[in-house]
C-alpha cells in the first residue's frame, strides 16, 4: 500500500479509464488509485473491475448508485481515503487534461511543506492548450472574480488537480461543504485557506480532453459564480 491515493471520479469514461490507470501505475513514484464511478451506463466501472485482479491492493472502486455531483463523489472518496489512512490524497480528472506525471510534482510540494498543492494553469509557468480563446478568457476571469470576492491568494481558484495532506481533510468538516458542482473546487480551497493551511500552486500544462465528452455546462459555471457570493460570508470551523 502506498501513502498516496489518487481519487478519480468517472462518468462515461470508458475511452480513457484503462489508459489512465495504467499510466498512473507506470509512474516512478507509487500511487494507489480509487475510481469513484457514478454508475456510468457505458460500462466504465466494469472496465475498472476487470483490471482490479491485475493490480491487487492498488486499484480500488467505489461505485455510487447515481450521478449527483462532482463534490459528493470526491467527498465519498475523501472519507474512504481517510478510513484507509493515506497521507497524500489527490484529485484528478480521468480525461488526461491533467498530466499524470504532474502527480509527482504535487506530491513533492506537500512533502516539502505545503498542506494543499494545486496544479495551476494561471500561476507563473502554467499554461492551457487546445482551448478556444473564449473558454480561456472565461476561465481566467472566473478565477480572478473569485480572488477578488474571497480575497484568496490562489491564481487558479477553480482548479481540479490537487494534492491534500491528510490533516487538511481531517480538519475540514466535509459534511458542511455546501456545493457539489464546479463551485465545490472553489469551496474546498476557501475552507482550507480560512482554516490556515498552507496552499502552494504548482504550474502545469492543462490541455483539453481528446476522447469522451466534457461534463462542463453553463449551468455548472453559473452555480460557481453565484456560490462565491454565498461563500464570502461563511465561516469554516475545524472539525473537533
Image (cartoon, rainbow, N blue to C red):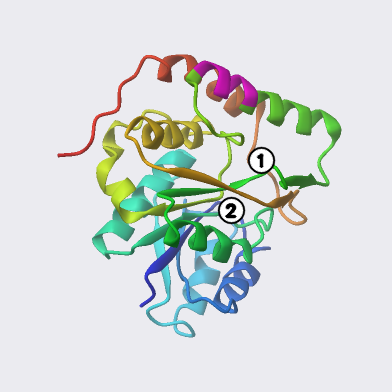
The quadrant the N terminus occupies is: bottom left
Can residue 180 be seen?
A: no
The quadrant the C terminus occupies is: top left
x%, y% of residue 162?
A: 51, 50
Label 1 Cα neighbours within 10 Å, binned few <14 / some 14-19 / many ≥20: some
Q: Tell me if 184 is positioned left or right of 137 in this view.
A: left
Q: Which residue is mark 2?
A: 93
Q: Quadrant of residue 47?
A: bottom right
Residue at the spot x=42%, y=29% of the render?
179
**The magenta segment:** 144-149
Q: Looking at the picture, tell me which residue is in the foreground, 168 or 184.
A: 168
- Circle nearer the N terminus (1, 2): 2
Q: Is residue 232 above or below residue 214?
A: above
Structural distance between the alpha carbons of marks 1 and 2? 20 Å
Q: Is residue 151 above or below residue 166?
A: above
Q: Looking at the picture, tell me which residue is in the foreground, 106 or 73.
A: 106
Q: Tell me if 85 is positioned left or right of 52 in this view.
A: left
Can residue 164 be seen?
A: yes
Amino acid at each position: 500500500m502506498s501513502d498516496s491515493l489518487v481519487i478519480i471520479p468517472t462518468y462515461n469514461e470508458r475511452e480513457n479509464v484503462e489508459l489512465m490507470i495504467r499510466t498512473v501505475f507506470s509512474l516512478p513514484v507509487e500511487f494507489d488509485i480509487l475510481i469513484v464511478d457514478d454508475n456510468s451506463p457505458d460500462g466504465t466501472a466494469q472496465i475498472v473491475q476487470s483490471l482490479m485482479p491485475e493490480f491487487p491492493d492498488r486499484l480500488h472502486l467505489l461505485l455510487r448508485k447515481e450521478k449527483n455531483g462532482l463534490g459528493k463523489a470526491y467527498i465519498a472518496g475523501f472519507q474512504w481515503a481517510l478510513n484507509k489512512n493515506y497521507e497524500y490524497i489527490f484529485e484528478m480528472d480521468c480525461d488526461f487534461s491533467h498530466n499524470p506525471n504532474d502527480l509527482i510534482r504535487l506530491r513533492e510540494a506537500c512533502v516539502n511543506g505545503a498542506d494543499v498543492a494545486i496544479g495551476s494553469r494561471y500561476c507563473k509557468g502554467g499554461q492551457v492548450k487546445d482551448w478556444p480563446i473564449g473558454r480561456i478568457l472565461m476561465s481566467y476571469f472566473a478565477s480572478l472574480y473569485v480572488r477578488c470576492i474571497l480575497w484568496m491568494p490562489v491564481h487558479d481558484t477553480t482548479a481540479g488537480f490537487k494534492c491534500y495532506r491528510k490533516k487538511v481533510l481531517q480538519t475540514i468538516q466535509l459534511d458542511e461543504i455546501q456545493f457539489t458542482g464546479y463551485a465545490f473546487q472553489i469551496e474546498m480551497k476557501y475552507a482550507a485557506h480560512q482554516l490556515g493551511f498552507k496552499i502552494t500552486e504548482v504550474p502545469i500544462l492543462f490541455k483539453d480532453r481528446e476522447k469522451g465528452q466534457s461534463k462542463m455546462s453553463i449551468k455548472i459555471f453559473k452555480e460557481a459564480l453565484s456560490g462565491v457570493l454565498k461563500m464570502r460570508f461563511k465561516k469554516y470551523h475545524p472539525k473537533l
